[in-house]
């Protein structure tokens, strides 16, 4: 394949069943408090277009920017009462550290289950979940954290919760059972099972991006070098897309237009561009060694890409290759690169409510980085052993689709 920034070769797509998606149908269950009525699903967007969302999903306000409601200052009044905190899951010390962003100090720590991977804000923004997938065992659990008090509750036994998402209608949590090659749809509050989607070819299924209308999601297959597309309404696997470089896809981010997807690949050292509707690879943007996490800026003009500095799952400390790339959504070009002073391993995190700081875990260096999004200046804060998918709280937006707080 060509090594130019944009690829023109045909992508390999395997479709299961009929092409496209089956007609949407409503699911049973209590309607979420912020959901639009079915009658209001056809909503004029700010651009003059209209997006027909799945039943119960809040309307799309701006069809050109699905992150328009996650702009600075647009914080739900209840969420605004929560103290500002950074919640950091530490994979090897089996705990969560809590940082006060005002002082840049650790103000609390508490044990959770075995192998906490991510801290995930719920769809309704009133619970933060630590996903403890208990690597190598069947003792997985979800630890609820009350964002008002910052304290953990009683863990809920759940099989292999490597990561977790929420359908945009708020009716289901999607527990990503990575080792099982499976997506478990569960009640978003009780975590009782609703149904599962098997993805037998998707080895290392772990991260997802949702379409603008909520009708499908695309998941990365870390150890298979491919993507899996899933019908979120009918809970069906649609098909697979083998990436041209056959690397190790990690995080995936939906573009502001809700149709383009960006896939961080740790072996390809860059970001693949994928058209979600046609499920075809359309380009590639080189960034840095060990490309891993992707997060949008609060104004949705840029995406921040964490380059972990190594191709290894368990990489070295203080890697000189560790960096953060800033990509312009409009041009798909890297406009800045910020190296980690002294070397490091930026992994996953999120952006502050005002958009002025990018918070990322330093996976192999047992630290958290707070990065000024204007200058790239960094503050390093020691935490527990092997921090992973931290979240920033509060965040603006109407609802969370999961991971470390992808807000809409």
Image (tube, rainbow, N blue to C red):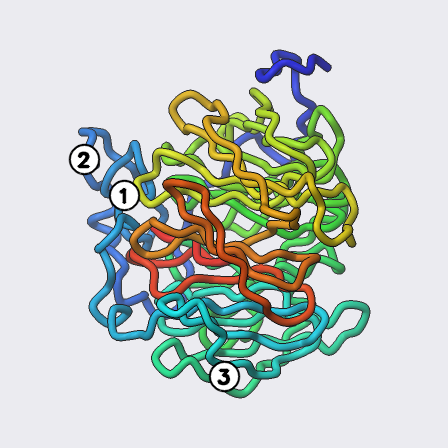
Q: Are marks 2 and 1 in contact (CB under 8 Å)?
A: yes
Report whether 248 appears left or right of 42: right
Residue under label 3, please give it. 152
**Counting residues from the N terminus, which is met first, the one under dot 2 or under dot 1?**
2
At horizontal 44% and vertical 40% (from top left) the residue drawn is: 211
**C-alpha span from label 3 to label 2:** 40 Å
Residue 256 position (above or below residue 210) = above
Q: Position of residue 51 (x, y in %)?
A: 29, 37
Q: Earlier in the sequence, mark 3 or mark 2?
A: 2
- What is the C-alpha distance between the residues marked 3 and 1? 31 Å
Please give the count of numbered marks on the rendered protein. Answer: 3
Q: Which residue is mark 2?
A: 46
Residue 196: horizontal and vertical position, in percent?
62, 60
Of circles 2 and 1, which is in front?
1
Q: Residue furthest front?
A: 342
Residue at (30, 40) in percent of width and height: 299
Q: Residues within 10 Å of mark 2 (few under 14, many from 20)?
A: some
Q: State the residue position of label 1.
A: 68
User: Which residue is pictured at 52% across the width and 33% down the height?
Assistant: 337
What residue occupies the far bottom of the structure in this picture? 154
| Quadrant that contains the N terminus | top right
Mark toward the start of the polypeptide (3 vs 1): 1
Residue 74 visible from this viewpoint: yes
Write down the quadrant of residue 247 in the picture.
Answer: top right
């Amino acid at each position: 394949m060509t090594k130019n920034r944009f690829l023109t070769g045909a992508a390999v797509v395997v479709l299961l069943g009929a092409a496209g998606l089956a007609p949407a149908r409503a699911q049973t269950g209590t309607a979420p408090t912020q959901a639009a009525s079915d009658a209001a699903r056809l909503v004029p967007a700010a651009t003059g277009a209209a997006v027909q969302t799945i039943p119960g999903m809040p309307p799309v306000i701006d069809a050109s920017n699905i992150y328009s409601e996650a702009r600075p200052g647009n914080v739900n009044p209840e969420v605004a009462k929560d103290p500002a905190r950074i919640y950091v899951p530490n994979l090897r010390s089996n705990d969560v550290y809590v940082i006060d962003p005002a002082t840049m100090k650790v103000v609390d720590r508490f044990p959770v289950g075995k192998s906490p991977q991510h801290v995930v804000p719920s769809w309704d923004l009133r619970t933060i979940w630590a996903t403890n997938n208990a690597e190598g065992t069947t003792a997985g659990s979800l630890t609820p954290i009350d964002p008002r008090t910052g304290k953990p509750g009683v863990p809920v036994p759940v099989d292999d919760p490597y990561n977790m998402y929420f359908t945009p209608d708020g009716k289901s949590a999607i527990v990503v059972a990575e080792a099982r090659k499976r997506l478990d749809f569960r009640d978003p509050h009780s975590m009782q099972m609703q149904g599962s989607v098997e993805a037998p070819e998707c080895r290392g299924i772990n991260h997802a991006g949702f379409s603008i209308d909520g009708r499908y999601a695309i998941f990365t297959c870390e150890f298979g070098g491919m993507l899996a597309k899933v019908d979120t309404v009918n809970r069906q696997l649609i098909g697979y897309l083998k990436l041209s470089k056959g690397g190790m896809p990690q995080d995936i981010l939906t573009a502001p237009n809700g149709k383009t997807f960006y896939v961080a690949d740790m072996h390809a050292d860059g970001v693949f561009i994928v058209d979600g509707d046609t499920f075809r690879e359309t380009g590639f943007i080189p960034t840095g060694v060990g490309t891993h996490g992707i997060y949008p800026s609060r104004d949705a003009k840029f995406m921040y890409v964490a380059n972990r500095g190594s191709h290894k799952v368990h990489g070295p400390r203080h890697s000189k290759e560790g960096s953060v790339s800033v990509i312009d959504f409009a041009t798909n070009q890297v406009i800045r690169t910020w190296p980690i002073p002294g070397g490091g391993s930026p992994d996953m995190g999120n952006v502050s409510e005002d958009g002025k700081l990018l918070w990322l875990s330093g996976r192999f260096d047992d630290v958290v980085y707070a990065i000024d999004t204007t200058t790239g200046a960094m503050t390093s804060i020691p935490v527990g052993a092997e921090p992973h998918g931290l979240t920033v709280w509060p965040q603006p937006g109407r609802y969370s689709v999961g991971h470390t707080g992808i807000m809409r």
